[in-house]
Image: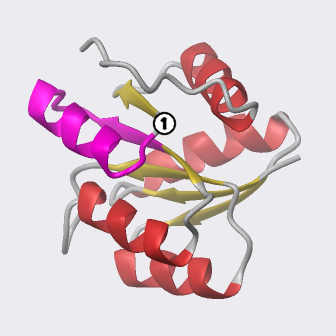
Amino acid sequence: MAEILVLDDVLDATVLIGKILTKKGHSVHTFTEEDAALQFAKTEAVDLAILDIKLQKMSGVAVLALLKQVRPDMRAIMLTGYPTVETAREAISLGADEYCVKPIDRQELEEKVEKVLKGKSRKSPISI
């Protein structure tokens, strides 16, 4: 299955996503710090990054831009508890494939991960 990087400043969120996606057969690498996630992506294969938009040191959108420099073919799903049209547009313009609103719904996450990994990402405007 896929190598998935999860970055959220809330440990419980990374644990939850990790459990959900590990049960689906994916190899999930969870992080709560941006620097550690970026370092991991420089040395390890990453098929999909799931990033919270609100992080400790920088925004998830900024992390996405840095990850895309290292792994241009990597897919991405952005997470947020504070959805805005502007943030969604910015994330999509930087290469995010999907957008999930917290609290995380297990079925929605599984469906979006599967769709993104199959290359059926939504590149048209995202509804929030």
Q: Position of residue 38 (x, y in %)?
A: 47, 79
Q: Nearer the viewer, residue 37 or 16?
A: 37
Q: Nearer the viewer, residue 15 or 27?
A: 27
Q: Amino acid at mark 1?
A: Asp
All told, the count of numbered labels is 1
Q: Locate residue 120: give its quadrant.
A: top right
Q: Position of residue 34 (x, y in %)?
A: 37, 75
Q: Nearer the viewer, residue 96 or 36?
A: 96
At x 29% / y 57%, what residue is drawn? 60
Query: Colour scheme used in the picture?
Result: secondary structure
Q: Position of residue 57 (x, y in %)?
A: 19, 74
- Asked if residue 7 is positioned above or below residue 50 in the image, the reply reads below
At x 39% / y 56%, what residue is drawn? 8
Left or right: 114 with respect to 127? Answer: right
Query: Which quadrant would the C terminus be assigned to in this image?
Result: top left
Which stretch is magenta? 77-96
Left or right: 83 with respect to 102? Answer: left
Q: Position of residue 42 (x, y in %)?
A: 59, 85
Instruction: Return the residue at label 1.
Output: 97
Find out whether residue 122 is within the magenta segment. no
- Asked if residue 60 is positioned above or below residue 126 in the image, the reply reads below
Q: Is residue 84 visible?
A: no
At x 65% / y 48%, what residue is drawn? 18
Q: Is residue 102 visible?
A: yes
Q: Nearer the viewer, residue 16 or 102?
A: 102
Q: Locate residue 19: give its quadrant.
A: top right
- Asked if residue 63 is positioned above or below residue 15 in the image, the reply reads below
Left or right: 42 with respect to 36? Answer: right
Find out whether residue 85 is within the magenta segment. yes
What secondary structure is marked by label 1? loop
At x 29% / y 44%, what residue is drawn? 93
